[in-house]
Structure formats: C-alpha cells, structure tokens
C-alpha cells in the first residue's frame, strides 16, 4: 500500500489544528513564585520606585477579578470592540492594571483610533509594560503584558500617530482608571 505525501500532510495538519484548538492550549500554567522586586515609574510619586511583582494561583486570581477581567488578564482574551467602558473615556488621569494596580498609561497619551478599544501612543514608562511576540490566531502581533503581574493587556501596533507611531490597543477590562486631583 502506497501512502501519498499529501494525505500525510492533511492528516498532520488536522491533528495540529485539533491540538491547538483544544480548550486551555493557549493558557499558561501559573505557579506562585516568590515576589521579585521590579523598577517601575509611579505617576503619583513622579519618579521610579521599586515594587514587588505579583504572583497568585489561578484560584486566587479568580477570587480577585471579575469573570471578564480574569478571561482577559489571565486567559489572554479580548473584549468585543466598542464594548469597554474606556473606549470613549476622556477624563484626566492614569490607567492602571486591573490586576495589580500598576500605572500603565496617562490620559494625555490616549487617542481615538476608531478601533473600539482604548488606544494610547505610549506607556507612562517603558518599564511599566512588557512586550512579547504573539503568533496566535495565525498572525504575528506584539502582545502587551503587565510586568508586575504578567496580566494580558492587549497588543501594540506600529500604525499609531506621531510622535511615537505606536498604537497600544488595550482591553478596558484590563484597566482601572484613577482620576487626577484637580489643581
């Protein structure tokens, strides 16, 4: 019996697709690690500070976050476009990580991208976000994570306005807004 190569590739492709689409395949295994100190920028203190990283078990995260926040921050989900509370939000203040409270973006760096997600030209400081390659869903993107709790925030693209040319496209559920005191 002669097996044709195209049948083998078809079967192999089907197996790979089935494994990739299995529930939980894209979820990372989380174990509680000892807190490490990281250097980040504090908008409140207007300077760099040292802070502990945040590490929790899956069950601890489920208790601390809403169902939507857990899906986005811990399972790398995405909220539907135009559904988030910060998509059309214009108050002055700071957007923090909903998982750990780390300062991420300033309102003055927010812009209307027309995508339906809150978009920013830059983080409060380079140290306050962590970028990593994301090749899921048959695309190449750059995922944006919180460096303190490793929560998924969204993605960054090179199609933003000047001066940075970047568009940090974030999920509202991954953010917590804190208004600045009026002067």
Image (cartoon, rainbow, N blue to C red):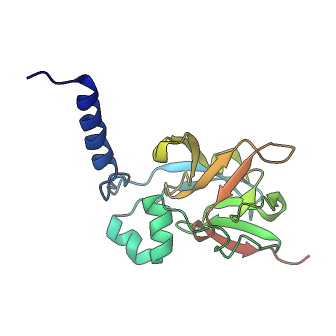
Residue 133 rendering spot, x and y as whole percentages:
53, 39
**Relative depth, front residue between 154 and 39:** 154
Q: In front here: 26 or 56?
A: 26
> In the drawing, does residue 133 fall left or right of residue 9?
right
Foreground of the two, 146 or 74: 74
The C terminus: image quadrant:
bottom right
Residue reaching furthest to the left: 1
**Whole-percent x, y for residue 45 in the image:** 74, 61
Q: Residue furthest front?
A: 1
Q: Residue at x 28, y 30 (%)?
A: 9
Taking the image as shown, residue 77 lies to the left or right of residue 29, namely right
Report the quarter where the N terminus lies: top left
- State the image coordinates of residue 179 (x, y, percent, origin top left): 77, 75
**Quarter location, residue 106:** bottom right
Q: Residue at x 46, y 50 (%)?
A: 36
Q: Is residue 122 visible to us here?
A: yes
On screen, residue 42 versus residue 34, left or right, reads right
Q: Residue furthest right?
A: 183
Give percent across and percent down for residue 48: 69, 51
Above or below for 10 versus 78: above
For this orientation, the residue located farthest to the top is 2
Q: Is residue 65 visible?
A: no
Look at the picture and state if 21 lies above or below 67: above
Q: Residue drawn at (64%, 73%), measured in percent from left and top? A: 84
Please give the count of numbered marks on the rendered protein. Answer: 0
Q: Nearer the viewer, residue 87 or 49?
A: 87
């Amino acid at each position: 019996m002669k097996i044709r190569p195209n049948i083998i590739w078809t079967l192999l492709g089907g197996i790979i697709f089935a494994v990739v689409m299995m529930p939980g395949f894209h979820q990372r295994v989380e174990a509680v690690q000892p807190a490490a100190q990281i250097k980040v920028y504090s908008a409140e203190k207007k300077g760099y500070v040292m802070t502990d990283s945040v590490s929790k078990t899956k069950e601890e995260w489920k208790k601390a976050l809403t169902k939507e926040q857990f899906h986005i921050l811990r399972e790398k989900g995405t909220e539907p476009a135009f559904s988030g509370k910060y998509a059309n939000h214009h108050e002055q203040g700071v957007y923090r990580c909903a998982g750990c409270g780390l300062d991420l973006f300033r309102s003055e760096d927010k812009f209307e991208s027309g995508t339906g997600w809150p978009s920013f030209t830059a983080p409060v400081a380079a140290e306050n976000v962590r970028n990593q390659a994301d090749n899921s869903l048959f695309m190449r993107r750059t995922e944006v994570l919180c460096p303190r709790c490793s929560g998924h925030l969204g993605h960054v693209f090179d199609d933003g306005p000047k001066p940075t040319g970047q568009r940090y496209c974030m999920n509202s559920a991954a953010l917590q807004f804190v208004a600045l005191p009026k002067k």
